[in-house]
Amino acid sequence: MTGPRVVVVGNGMVGERFVEALRTRDRDGRWRVTVLAEERRPAYDRVRLSAFFDGVSAEELNLHTPDDGVELRLGEPALRIDRERRLVTTAGGEVPYDALVLATGSYPFVPPVDGTDLPGVFVYRTLDDLAAIREHARGRRTGAVIGGGLLGLEAANALRLLGLDTSVVEFAPRLMPAQVDEAGGAMLRRYVEELGVTPYLGVATSALRPGPDGTVAALELADGRTVDAELVVVAAGIRPRDELARAAGLPLGPRGGVLVDAGCRTADERIWAVGECAAVDGTCHGLVAPGYATAEVVADRLLGGAATFPGADTATKLKLLGVDVASFGDAHGTTPGCLDVTFTDPATRAYAKLVLSDDARTLLGGVLVGDASAYPTLRASVGGPLPAPPLALLAPAGGAGSGAGALPAAAQVCSCNAVTRADIDAAIAGGAGDVPALKACTRAGTSCGSCVPMLKQLLDAAGVRQSTALCEHFDTSRQELFDIVRVRGIRTFSQLIAEHGRGRGCDICKPVVASILASLGTGHVLDGEQASLQDTNDHFLANLQRDGSYSVVPRIPGGEITPEKLIVIGEVARDFRLYTKITGGQRIDLLGARVEQLPQIWRRLVDAGFESGHAYGKALRTVKSCVGETWCRYGVQDSVGLAVALELRYRGLRAPHKLKSAVSGCARECAEARSKDFGIIATETGWNLYVGGNGGFRPRHADLFATDLSTEALIPLIDRFVMYYIRTADRLQRTAAWIEAMDGGLDHLRSVIVDDSLGLCAELDAAMARHVASYSDEWRDVLEDPERLRRFTSFVNAPDVPDPSITFTVARGQPVPARAADHRRQPVALGLPEVRR
Amino acid sequence: MRTLNWTPVCPLDRLDPDRGVAALVDGVQVALFRTGGELYAVDNLDPVGGAYVMSRGIVGSRGGLPTVASPLHKQVYDLRTGRCLEVAGVTLRRHRIRCRDGLVEVRLRQEE
Ligand code: SRM
Ligand SMILES: Cc1cc2nc3c(=O)[nH]c(=O)nc-3n(C[C@H](O)[C@H](O)[C@H](O)COP(=O)(O)OP(=O)(O)OC[C@H]3O[C@@H](n4cnc5c(N)ncnc54)[C@H](O)[C@@H]3O)c2cc1C
Ligand code: SF4
Ligand code: FES
C-alpha cells in the first residue's frame, strides 16, 4: 500500500481523537497513519487524571484503541521537522510525511522562583507525574500547591487525599480567578477551608527552601510568611508546546502556540496543528472540547472537506469533593450593558450568578458554586432565550426541574463532543431508546459525563418511556414481579423465570426474587433452590469482608444488653480471635471469622440467647434508642421499651433495601430518629411518627407523618408503612427515595395507610401478622439442620483446611487483616439506585 | 507445584446447581460451578478484589453466556473464557474440569 502518509506528533487526548476521526471517515484507507509519541503509554484520559489517586488504574484511563492501519511509536518523540524534505526526525531515524499534524499539547509553566528544581517539587500533567507525587508523599506530612486555579485546586485535593496537610498559594485575591467572580470565590474559599486546605491568597511565592535532607521543606511568601511543605506541586498555568514549529520557522501566535487558520492549517500547507498547542486564529484553548473540534476539522480537511473551527465553549465544571463549581459563557459580565442576577443561600451555601443581556432576555453566562445542578441546562442555553425566569432557574432544585425539554434545537447539549439538542432528537427519532444508545450514536455523554442527566431528560421530553425492566432476564419492575409472585402464588425462581422471564438469571434479579420470596414468607433463605439466589452475605448469614472473612453481628434490640451477654460476646471474640467493634447501630460487630467457623461461633451465641442481627440482609437492621424516661431526667416516655418491642416485631423482615429505625425519649432526639426509615419521638402524651429518613450517601431527614399517637395506634401505622414499602418499592430503593418518587408523595402515603383509600389496609395488616407469627431465628435453624450446615466449609475436598489466604496482623491490640502489599485499593462504585420519575 | 494430573475433588452431587464451591487442588484455590448442565472451574481468587471468594458469587447468564459475579464488588465474568465483562483486560484463570463415574475431577491449567 502506498497511499499518502500523515504523521501525527503527540498521542495525547486530541492526537488520539484526530486519528480516530480520520480512520472513521477515511473508509477506503487512503491515508497511512504514523503516530510519534513522547510518553511511554498510549493516549489516556488526562481530564480524569486525578482519578489515579482513587485507585483508577492507567488501563482504565486508556483512550487508545489499537488499529492495524495506525503505526503508534511510543517513547519516540519528534525531535526536528525538515520542511524542505518533508521529514520528521526521531531518535530512531527519519519519518517522511505528506501531511504533518502537530498535537503536542502544553507543558506546565513553572515560574522563575528559586528552588523549583529541588527534589520534591512536581508538576501535574502526566500519569508519570502523579506516580512520582504519590511516591514522594509517602511518609510526608505537609504539601503545598502553587496556583489556585482549576488545576491547582484539583492537585490540592489530591494531596489532601494522600494524607498531606495542604496549602494553596494563589497570586490573585481569590481562588479560581479565571472562572469565578469575587462572591463566588469567597464561597469557594469557605468550602476549601472546610476540607482542611489552607489558602494563601493575593500573595506570590518568593522561594522554595530545602530541608536538611536536600528535598523541599517550605515555601517563602512575598509577605514574609513561610508555609511548611515537604511536597510542592506547581500548577501556575500551561504554555503551548510549540518548540518544533518554532525551530522549523513556522509562525507562532501572539502568546505562543502554533499559529493556524480556522481550518487549523499552519503557514506551511502540509502542516496542521490541533489541541492545546494550536493557536487558532491566534488563540490557544486549554480545554479538551475545543481541542476535539480542531481534530475533527483537520480529519475533514485531509479528506477534502472544508470544515472550520466552530469557536470554543469555555464552560468548566469542577467537583472538589462535594463542592461543585461551574462557570460558563461570559461569566465575568464583560458584555456592555449586561445585567447580573445573583442568588446566595447561606443555609445551603449555594452561590449563583447569571449574566443576562441588557433586555434580560438572553443568557450570556454565569457562575455556580455549591449547587451546580442547573449547569447542564444553563450552559446549553447560553446565547439563547432563558428557558425559565432567572429565579426559577437558580433556586436550588429549580435548575433540575426547569428541564432540558425547554431547550431550543440549536442548544449544545454535550459540549465535550459538540452535540446539539437537534442531534439528540434526531438520534431519538432514529430509534435510540436509552442513554447507552444515545452515547453510541451521538458520542454525547462519553467524555466528562456531565450532560448525561440531560440526555435522560431529553428522552423523557421526547416521550420515550425508559425501561423499567429489572435486567435482561425480566421485563418487569420489582413491584410488578412482587405482584406476580404474590398473586400467582409462585414459590420458586425456576418457575418464575420459566413463566415470566428468560435465561438463567443474574446477580441483579436473583437477590431481588430471593427477597420477594422471603418477604412473602416462603421458608428458610437457605432451603433448596432459594440458597442459590442469595447474595454471599445472605448465603452465609454474615457479611463478607475485604479479605474473604466474615463478620458476625448478633441482635441487641434497642442497644440494651445484660452484663452476662456482654461477657459471652467477649469470650467468643477472645476464643475465636475476632476483632470487635461497637457499631454505629448500637451493637457489637465481631470480625474476621472464616466460613467454617461461623456455625461454631453461632452455636456459642445462640446457646447464650443471641439471635441473628440480619446485618447481612436487606431487612430490618436496628431500632436504636436513647435511655429514655427510665434514667434520663428529660425523658417523657419509655424509649428503650418501645425500641425493643419494635425491633422484635420487625426482625427478620426482608425488604427492597435495609430498614432502620430509632426511638427518642424526648424532643432532644438523642437517638437520631429523624435519620431513619421510620423514627419515633416521644411527646408528653404519646409518640410522633416520622418516615422516610436516612443517613448514608444522601442524608435526608424523615418527614412528620402522624402526631401524639398511643402505642396501640402507632404500631399498625408502622406495619402498613413497612408492608406497603415492601410491596411497591423498587430494587435497592430506600424509603426516602420511594416516597420522593411516589405520585402525590406523603399525602398519598397517608391516604393509603391512614384512610385506606386503596382498600389495602386489611391485607397489609394480615401480611404483617403472618410475618410476626412465622418469625424464627435463621441461625438457630441452620444449626439444627445438617443439610444447611454443609454449606459452611472452606474447601469441598479439604474441609479441615482453613483458607490459607486469610491471615492477620495486630493493630491496637486486636487482629486485623494482613493485606498483600501489592494489592491496591480499588475504587468501588456506590451501588445506589437511581430514582425514577 | 503445578501438575497436569486430574485430581478427583468430590462427588457430583456436592455441587449444587448454580452455586459454587471452593476446592484446593495442588495447593491452588479453585472455584467450581455447575450450571446449565455444564461444569466450570476457575481461580477462586477475585482478580479485582484480591480475596479468594469467587466460589461464593452469584451464578447466572448474560446474553446466554454462563456467568459468575464477584461477591465483593460484583464484576461479572464469562465462565467459559474467564473474561471479565466489565473491566477490560481482567480475566479469571480457567482450569479443566470433568465428571468421571459420578466424581468431579479438576486439572490445573498452567500459566498461559
Ligand atoms: C458495622 C457498621 C459500621 C460500624 O462499624 O459502625 C456498618 C457497616 C456496613 N455498612 Fe453501614 N454500617 C453501620 C451503620 C450504618 C449507619 C448508622 C446507623 O445505622 O445508624 C448508616 C447511616 C444510616 C442509614 O443507613 O441511613 C450506614 C449507612 C450505610 C450505607 C448507605 C445507605 C444509604 O441509604 O445511603 C451502606 C450501603 C448500602 O447499604 O447500600 C452501608 C453498608 C454497610 C456494609 C454492609 C457494607 C458492605 O456491604 O460490606 C458494612 C457491613 C459491615 C459488616 O460486615 O459488618 N451502610 N451504616 C454499622 C453497623 C450497624 C449495625 O449494628 O447494624
Ligand atoms: C489534571 C488535569 C485535569 C484536567 N481537567 C480538564 C477538564 O476538566 N476539562 C477539560 O476540558 N480539560 C481538562 N484538562 C485539560 C486537557 O487534559 C487538555 O486540554 C487535553 O489533554 C489536551 O489534549 P492535547 O492532545 O492537545 O494535549 P495532551 O493531552 O497534553 O497531549 C500531548 C501529547 O503530546 C506529547 N508530545 C509533546 N511533544 C512531543 C513531541 N515532540 N513528540 C512526540 N510527542 C510529543 C506529550 O508528551 C503528550 O503526550 C485537564 C488537564 C489536566 C492535566
Ligand atoms: S432524647 Fe431525651 S430522654 Fe432520650 S436521652 Fe436525650 S434527653 Fe434524655
Ligand atoms: S458535556 Fe462532557 S460528555 Fe457531554
Image (cartoon, helix red, strand yellow):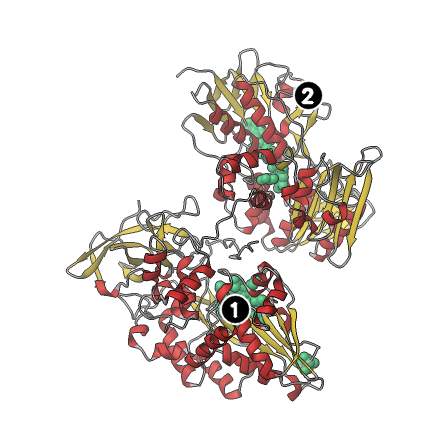
Query: x%, y% of residue A131?
Result: 55, 45
Q: Residues within 10 Å of mark 2 (few under 14, many from 20)?
A: many
Quadrant of the image where one finds ligand 4: top right
Q: Closest to the observer: A59 or A710?
A: A710
Image quarter in which the N terminus of chain A is found: top left
Asked if residue A176 can be seen in this view, the reply is: no
In the displayed structure, A793 sits above or below B49; it is below
Which residue position is annotated with label 2?
A252
The subunit letter for the residue under badge 2 reads A
Q: Is mark 1 within 8 Å of ligand 1?
A: no
Label 2 in the same subunit as label 1:
yes
Asked if residue A300 can be seen in this view, the reply is: yes
In the displayed structure, A29 sits above or below A324; it is above
Residue farthest to the top, as pictured: A84
Image quarter of residue A380 = top right
Image quarter of residue A241 = top right
Residue farthest to the left, as pictured: B101
The answer to whether A43 appears left or right of A487 in the picture is right
Query: x%, y% of residue A726?
Result: 49, 67
Q: Amino acid at mark 1?
A: Tyr
Label whose residue precedes the other's in the sequence (2 or 1): 2
Q: Closest to the observer: A150 or A293?
A: A293
Query: x%, y% of residue B20?
Result: 32, 61
Q: Are marks 2 and 1 in contact (CB under 8 Å)?
A: no
| Secondary-structure class at tag 1 | helix
Label annotation for residue A724: 1
Q: Residues within 10 Å of mark 1 (few under 14, many from 20)?
A: some
In this rendering, the label closer to the viewer, 2 or 1: 1
Q: Closest to the observer: A699 or A249?
A: A699
Q: Amino acid at mark 2?
A: Leu
The answer to whether A343 appears left or right of A91 in the picture is right
| Secondary-structure class at tag 2 | loop
